[in-house]
Each structure stands twice: as C-alpha cells, then as structure tokens.
Image (spheres, rainbow, N blue to C red):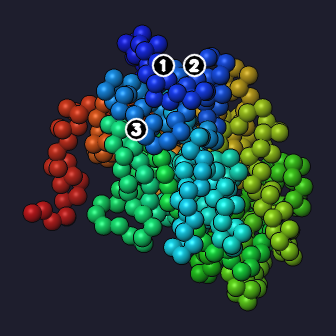
C-alpha cells in the first residue's frame, strides 16, 4: 500500500474539525480507536488497517463538500459500503478518510410504469426486492451476501449472484446513477430510459471499485417475478461429469435461472450446517433452477433431467413446492459460512473461465491443493464459469496465510491461462492487484490508468487498489498511439 502521507497525519486535528463542520450530526465523524476498529477491513479479513477517521455523511451535499475539501487539501479517501466485499476494496489507509455510505439507506421512488426503482446506495440488495415484492416484482442480481451487501457496493464491484446467468450482473440491471467527483461536482449518468446518448459512462462507473467517484443515488431495473420456478438437485460421481452436464445444458439452448455447482467438501459442510437435503454420497452436485410459464418449466425440467442422465447423473431430485425450492437454495446461499464452521479461516477466490475448461481447471485445483498443502472447497456459478474456490487455512499457524495467498494466486493464474479472467464479481481490490500483469500488458494497464487520471488526477480516491504501480500523468503522456498500431497492424488508420 502507498506510504502514509506524514503531512496529512500532522493535520489530523484540522481535518477532523473540518469534517465535523460538514457533518455535524452526532456520530457523523468517528475518531476513537475502539469505534474505528469495525472499519479496519472488509470481508477480506486477512488484511487490516485502522482508518485515520471515518465520516458518515447523510446527504449528497455533504458528500460533495467532503470530496471538495479532500481535493483542495490533498487528503486521500476510501469509499465504503456495507463492508462485505471480498477483495479488500474497502481496506482503509492510515492517512485517509473512510467515507461510509450506510446512512444513505432509503428507497426514494418506485416507478411501476417504467419498472424502475430509485434508491440510495446504502440500501441492501435484498432490501430492493422487499420494497417491490408486494406487487410481484424483484431485483434480479442476488449475491450470497444479499441480505447485508449494499447496492452501492454492488455497483463498485459489478456483483452478480446465482441468477446472473439468465438475468445479468449489476451492470445489466442498473439504469442510472448520481455520482460525486473528487472535485465535489455532482453528476447524473443514465436514467430510466432504455439507453442513453453519448459515451457509456454508466458501464465505466459500474465495477470501478471506488476509483472514479462516489455514487449517491442509483436507479435500477425491477423485473416481474416469474410465474413458476422449480429447482433440481443433480448428483454426479465426479466434478468432471458435473462440468460436462453444465456444458450440455447450455449447448442444448437452455438458459436456467440459476446453474450452480458444489464439490464434495462443500456439499458435506453445507448439509451439516443447513440440512437442505443434499446427498452426501456424490462428488459433485448441480443446482439447476428453471423459471417461466408453468408449461415451459415442466418441459425444461424433463429435458434437463434427460441431459443429466446422459451425462452420468446418479442422483436427481426436483423441488415439489416453493418451500422446498428455497430450502435447496438456502444451502447454496450459506455455503461460505458453512465452510467457516469447519476451518478457522478461508480465502474466497473469484476467477472466471470458459465453461468448456471447467473439468480441466477443477482437476488443476486439486493438484494445486496437494502442492500447497491446504484444503479447498468449490462452490461456484457453473453456468457462467465464475469459480469461488474456498481455500481453507489457519491464520494463527505460521506460514499458513502466505501459503493460502500463493495457492490463490496459482488458481487465478490457471484461470487466465485457460482463457479466463481474474475476477467475475468480487473485484480486484488489493487481493488480485499484483496479478493484473498476468492478464494485461503494460500498455493495457497504462490506458486504464489514463481513465483513472481523467477522473482523479491526484490519485486521492481509493489509492493502492487495482493498479500494481500507478504512474504519474507525465509518464502516461508518453504512451503513444504507435504502440497500439504496432500491436494491431491490420486496423485501418486515417
């Protein structure tokens, strides 16, 4: 992480006074060490750092005033939502103000005609669905942490969830945002319309991990709840057979509402925790949800069952009612805490691969597990190839954390080698930052840094995240179009 700015630390009392002028509410500025402790990390608890101070603004005007002050006084900022992120994206800095957006927790408007909801960024993911479900609507992206994670954090990391295969990630369900720049300017990007003119700034902001600005309002798409939804549990003798079934379902033109996979260690841990009725004598378990009109769902259940049988399924069970469907999903949604019951610590990875390489990568992970001497349980979005290997270790045992980090890095390198990417929905943060070179060339990275500089030239917003080495503006100006011309000589030039 960047070294703390000693000049900023020397001005801490003045900064605190300025923040209290901007946010005068009781508890709006946190400075006591014990009260700062809950903010020292996000869901990646292996890395911790007390923030200099924490500020909890209550309205967009206060956010704009804070950012303007920080820009004028060159004070670093770390934006924070609910703190459920798994890549260290909200890891504080000793010389930075952590801005918590959790007082922005209101649903502002439900527009039934345009099928849109306008909410503040501190509203939980599940809170949006609960605000609209009485009229048969819901918000589609559903990360496992949906009961706690905030929609603002979902935008920062472009979160997905178990239903993203059919209904898309956050970027496919966000229509517009209000965002405050580092200069304190309030911008509106997008809206309730189907599409907006000009550059796709909304696509740029979604997944930007707090490096470009702070989102203060969000407009999302809400969908009609499907008429019918049923789930199948399919068990296999090997992960390879399960992976082949996933590919066969998609190849048949069937796009399930959800298509998840768990291996034997994850199945056992989850069943012991949730008692969802999972079979314990299989090596791989597929959870397939089909939704839509009743006649379509009945037809697709039959087709998927036959595909699974052809792929070697040794277990099959279909949910008979809504309660049983939810029970099936409760196991998958609680897989992470289930692993927490059997391992002192775990690290959750987030590589994404082509579906056709699934069996190969799962086999490779088992070999890596033996090499590093640490266990791994696999729970993942099989339909879109988004893997969530859970590396089990004991942080109190000397060298275990370092082994877990090396194991995780090797998994992500393997994902990139087979044509995948470092992250599907958790973000880069600090966890994968030093692996960016495995996926991008130096020219690629410098082009991304130029976008960062366009929004935040002084590198005050969430420094130390995503970029292994951040260049200055002078260095970036040396990046010439000739580098692109040499790399892609077939593209016509004018």
Residue closer to the observer: 56 or 488:
56
* Residue at x-position 64% and y-position 47%: 149
**Earlier-in-chain disc, 1 versus 2:** 1
Q: Is residue 337 above or below residue 331?
A: above
Instruction: Give the alpha-carbon distance from disc 1 to disc 3, as whole Å.
Output: 17 Å
Looking at the rendered image, the disc whose residue lies closer to the viewer, 2 or 3, is: 3
Where residue 204 appears, as percent x and y from the top left, is 38, 53
**Residue 381 visible in the displayed image:** no
x and y percentages locating residue 285 in the rendered image: 78, 62
Q: Is residue 58 above or below residue 142?
A: above
Q: Which of the marked residues, 1 or 3, is nearer the chain's N terminus?
A: 1
Q: Which residue is mark 1?
A: 16
Instruction: State the image quarter where residue 212 is shown.
Output: top left
User: Where residue 64 is drawn, which disc sits there?
Assistant: 3
Classed neighbour count for the residue bearing mark 1: other residues with Cα under 10 Å, few (<14), some (14–19), many (≥20) = some
**Residue at 64%, 50% in the rendered image:** 124
Total numbered badges shown on the rendered structure: 3
Separation of residues labelled 2 and 3 (CA atoms): 21 Å
For residue 440, the mark is: none
Residue 31, disc: 2
* Residue 5 x %, y %: 39, 16
């Amino acid at each position: 992480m960047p070294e703390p700015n000693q000049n900023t630390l020397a001005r801490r009392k003045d900064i605190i006074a300025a923040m209290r002028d901007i946010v005068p509410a009781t508890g709006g500025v946190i400075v006591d060490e014990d009260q700062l402790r809950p903010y020292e990390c996000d869901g990646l608890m292996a890395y911790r750092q007390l923030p200099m101070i924490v500020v909890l603004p209550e309205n967009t005007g206060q956010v704009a005033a804070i950012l303007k002050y920080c820009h004028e006084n060159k004070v670093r900022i770390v934006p924070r939502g609910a703190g459920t992120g798994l890549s260290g994206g909200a890891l504080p800095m000793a010389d930075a103000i952590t801005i918590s957006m959790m007082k922005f927790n209101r649903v502002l408007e439900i527009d039934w005609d345009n099928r849109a909801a306008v909410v503040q960024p501190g509203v939980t993911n599940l809170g949006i669905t609960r605000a609209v479900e009485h009229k048969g609507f819901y918000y589609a992206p559903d990360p496992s942490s949906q009961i706690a994670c905030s929609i603002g954090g979902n935008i920062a990391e472009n979160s997905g969830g178990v239903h993203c295969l059919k209904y898309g990630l956050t970027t496919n369900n966000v229509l517009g945002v209000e965002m405050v720049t580092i200069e304190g300017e309030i911008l509106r990007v997008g809206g309730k319309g189907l599409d907006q003119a000009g550059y796709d700034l909304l696509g740029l902001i979604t997944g930007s991990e707090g490096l470009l600005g702070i989102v203060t309002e969000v407009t999302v798409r809400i969908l009609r709840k499907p008429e019918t939804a049923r789930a199948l549990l399919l068990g296999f003798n090997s992960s390879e057979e399960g992976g082949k079934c996933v590919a066969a379902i998609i190849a048949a033109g069937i796009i399930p509402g959800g298509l998840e996979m768990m291996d034997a260690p994850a199945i056992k841990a989850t069943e012991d925790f949730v008692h969802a009725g999972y079979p314990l004598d299989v090596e791989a378990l597929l959870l397939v949800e089909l939704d839509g009109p009743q006649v379509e769902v009945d037809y697709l259940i039959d087709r998927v069952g036959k595909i699974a049988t052809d792929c070697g399924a040794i277990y099959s069970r279909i949910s008979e009612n809504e309660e049983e469907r939810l029970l099936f999903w409760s196991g998958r949604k609680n897989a992470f805490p289930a692993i927490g019951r059997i391992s002192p610590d775990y690290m959750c990875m987030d590589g994404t691969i082509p579906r056709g390489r699934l069996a190969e990568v799962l086999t490779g992970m088992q070999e890596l597990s033996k090499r590093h001497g640490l266990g791994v349980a696999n729970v993942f979005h099989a339909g879109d190839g988004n893997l969530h290997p859970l590396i089990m270790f004991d942080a109190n045992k000397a060298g275990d954390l370092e082994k877990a980090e090396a194991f995780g890095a090797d998994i992500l390198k393997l994902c990139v080698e087979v044509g995948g990417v470092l992250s599907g929905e958790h973000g880069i943060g600090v966890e994968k930052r030093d692996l960016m070179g495995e996926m991008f060339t130096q020219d690629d990275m410098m082009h991304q840094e130029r976008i960062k500089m366009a929004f935040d030239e002084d590198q005050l917003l969430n420094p130390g995240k995503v970029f292994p080495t951040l260049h200055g503006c002078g260095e970036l100006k040396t990046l010439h179009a000739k580098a692109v011309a040499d790399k892609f000589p077939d593209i016509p030039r004018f």
